[in-house]
């Protein structure tokens, strides 16, 4: 799907880039201005697309001459990332023109345009350009209209430009603002849609920031504070602390935070964007374990540092709510995040303790490292009881077993509802945040029966991701529900076309697409 040479080149660019760019997009009709470098496109047979043909005429074929002769350009062949450079084209007041050679753009998908945008960003940033004009007309795909294809390309650039260097005091890359003008005959419609692009990019950025922050900073109260910051975008906020949760009887969630100095929280975000304010909401629930030591069932030292991203599910829910609010999505949506730190301590839960959940069901905690499901048990029950949603989707870095099954490529999908599953899978395909559905079954459910309580928090058999999902299912009542196990996809150790190493925010784009495609205005 993406060429290995692209990856090598992206890495190379990433390491050698001297500056970091923030992007500022502007939109213009198809006039030829000066004082910038141009970005134009050609097809796999070197035929210039859209306005590039006109520029080539004006410049007495200086573009097509380079395109047809550039030896290195001719040798590489990949879907989106060949480029050639035309220096000082005749008759044009452009200092340089980058020509991107595209594969079969007539079949480009949403994701192809995002990847193209990511590559564009890498290249422009590498060459330290500061004023760029892009001429996207002519890249017409059967699968997506011209406005959306340009929007997805811009989104790809914005996502690829993410960086997190607030704790660096030396060797910090200089940050420069990059002015990009989109020259297009559709410019006004592209401009009108741009706030929607920014909304998604801001949502993803917020998720990445929350997940990347170290666990001594991004504690449960701090995540709650970040969720509460969405109030300024019109999101209603409710935060429950330990006192309130004790009163409600949330013994399952609270059992996880007992070894921690930080107060456990349940943060609820409510976005009312549907014209019928009383319409049943849709609900998203996130696991927010700010750090997972494993508790008394302590994890081995090796790799434990990765457990700062164990709040990834909650990060996605907060980022998604931000995106929905910023683009004023026509939907009523609830976001609920269970926030705890799973630490060791005098009062920490012991393996074999029995706790009573908010639903009234009792749980024998046999392994304190299977804590995510304990958090979600109370968060899910609370969500369905308080808000009677049309459905609930929860996200959690829940099991190591899902990484064994699916690696870093797919997230696990578990659901009691076929329609919901299909919609999520479809949205995932579009955004290249792919889901793979696993089975649920009564015989798996039996594996979490406890001899002394209603259930135990680890299964007796081998299918660890499934028994974890069966556990969650006992807390959804009859609500249509889907669980996304994102343990393998929340964090990336290698650079991706639209994500630097680290937090991917996997799930934000997927769920934003899912909401937009199936639930908005309906
Ligand atoms: N947070 C972990 C799961 C995890 C593992 C996330 C690797 C990301 C990468 C979860 O709380 C956990 O520890 N699960 C245990 C469950 C087991 C004790 C039944 C696991 O998967 O080993
Ligand atoms: Zn754990
Ligand atoms: Zn965990």
Image: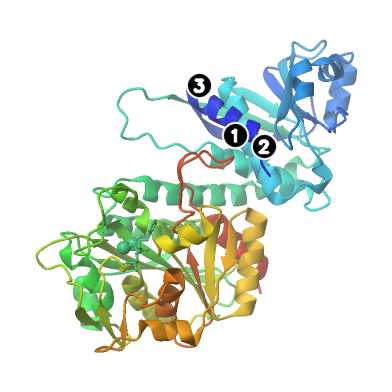
| Quadrant that contains the N terminus | top right
| Residue 125 at x, y percent in the picture | 57, 26
The residues bearing labels 3 and 1 have C-alpha atoms spaced at a distance of 14 Å
Q: Quadrant of residue 119?
A: top right
- Mark 2, residue position: 3
Say whether disc 3 or disc 1 marks the residue closer to the N-terminus: 1
Local SS, label 3: helix
The answer to whether 231 is drawn above or below residue 182 in the figure is below
| Residue 173 at x, y percent in the picture | 42, 24
The circle on residue 7 is 1
From the viewer's perspective, is 221 left or right of 234? left
Residue at the image point whose x is 27% and y is 50% from the top: 215
In front: mark 3 or mark 1? 1
Front-most of residues 158 and 119? 119
The circle on residue 16 is 3
Say whether disc 3 or disc 2 marks the residue closer to the N-terminus: 2
| Residue 105 at x, y percent in the picture | 80, 42
- The crowding category of the residue bearing disc 2, from other C-alpha atoms within 10 Å (few below 14, some 14 to 19, many at least 20), is few
Q: Tell me which image quadrant ligand 1 sits in.
A: bottom left
The residues bearing labels 3 and 2 have C-alpha atoms spaced at a distance of 20 Å
Say whether mark 1 is within 8 Å of ligand 1.
Answer: no
Local SS, label 1: helix
Q: Find out whether the residues at labels 1 and 2 contact each other: C-beta distance under 8 Å.
A: yes
The answer to whether 1 is drawn above or below residue 245 in the figure is above
The chosen color scheme is: rainbow
| Residue 272 at x, y percent in the picture | 51, 70
């Amino acid at each position: 799907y993406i060429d290995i040479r692209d990856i090598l080149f992206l890495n190379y660019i990433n390491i050698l880039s001297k500056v970091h760019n923030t992007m500022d997009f502007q939109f213009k009709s198809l006039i030829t201005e000066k004082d910038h470098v141009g970005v134009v496109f050609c097809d796999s047979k070197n035929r210039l697309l859209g306005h590039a043909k006109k520029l080539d005429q004006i410049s007495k074929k200086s573009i097509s001459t380079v395109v047809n002769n550039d030896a290195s350009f001719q040798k590489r062949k990949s879907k989106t990332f060949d480029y050639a450079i035309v220096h000082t084209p005749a008759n044009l007041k452009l200092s340089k023109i980058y020509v991107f050679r595209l594969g079969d753009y007539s079949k480009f998908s949403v994701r192809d345009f995002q990847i193209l945008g990511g590559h564009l960003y890498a290249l422009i940033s590498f060459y330290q350009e500061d004023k760029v004009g892009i001429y996207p007309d002519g890249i017409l795909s059967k699968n997506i209209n011209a406005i959306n294809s340009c929007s997805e390309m811009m989104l790809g650039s914005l996502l690829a430009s993410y960086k997190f260097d607030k704790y660096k005091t030396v060797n910090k890359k200089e940050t420069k603002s990059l002015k990009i003008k989109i020259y297009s005959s559709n410019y006004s419609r592209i401009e009108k849609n741009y706030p929607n692009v920014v909304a998604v990019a801001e949502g993803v950025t917020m998720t990445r920031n929350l997940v990347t922050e170290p666990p001594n900073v991004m504690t449960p109260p701090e995540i709650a504070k970040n969720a509460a910051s969405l109030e300024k975008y019109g999101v209603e906020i409710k935060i429950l602390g330990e006192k309130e949760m004790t009163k409600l009887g949330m013994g399952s969630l609270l059992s996880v935070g007992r070894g921690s100095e930080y107060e456990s929280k349940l943060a609820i975000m409510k976005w009312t964007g549907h014209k019928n304010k009383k319409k049943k909401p849709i609900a998203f629930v996130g696991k927010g374990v700010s750090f997972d030591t494993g508790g008394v069932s302590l994890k081995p030292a090796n790799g434990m540092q990765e457990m700062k991203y164990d709040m990834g599910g909650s990060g996605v829910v907060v980022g998604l709510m931000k995106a929905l609010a910023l683009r004023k999505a026509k939907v009523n949506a609830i976001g609920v995040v269970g926030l705890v730190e799973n630490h060791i301590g005098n009062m920490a839960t012991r393996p074999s303790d029995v706790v009573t959940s908010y639903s009234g069901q009792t749980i024998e905690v046999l392994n304190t490292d299977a804590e995510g499901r304990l958090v979600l048990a109370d968060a899910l029950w609370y969500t369905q009881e308080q808000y009677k949603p049309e459905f609930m989707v929860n996200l959690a870095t829940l099991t190591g077993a899902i990484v064994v099954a699916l690696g870093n490529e797919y997230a696990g999908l578990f659901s009691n509802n076929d329609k919901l599953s299909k919609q999520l899978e479809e949205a995932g395909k579009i955004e290249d945040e792919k889901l793979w559905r696993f089975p649920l079954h009564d015989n798996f459910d039996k594996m979490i029966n406890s001899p002394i309580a209603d259930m135990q928090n680890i299964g007796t058999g081998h299918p660890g991701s499934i028994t974890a999902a069966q556990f969650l299912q006992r807390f959804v009542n009859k609500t249509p529900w889907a669980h996304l196990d994102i343990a393998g996809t929340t964090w990336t150790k290698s650079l991706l076309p639209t994500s630097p190493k680290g937090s991917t925010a996997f799930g934000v784009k997927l769920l934003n697409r899912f909401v937009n495609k199936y639930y908005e205005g309906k």
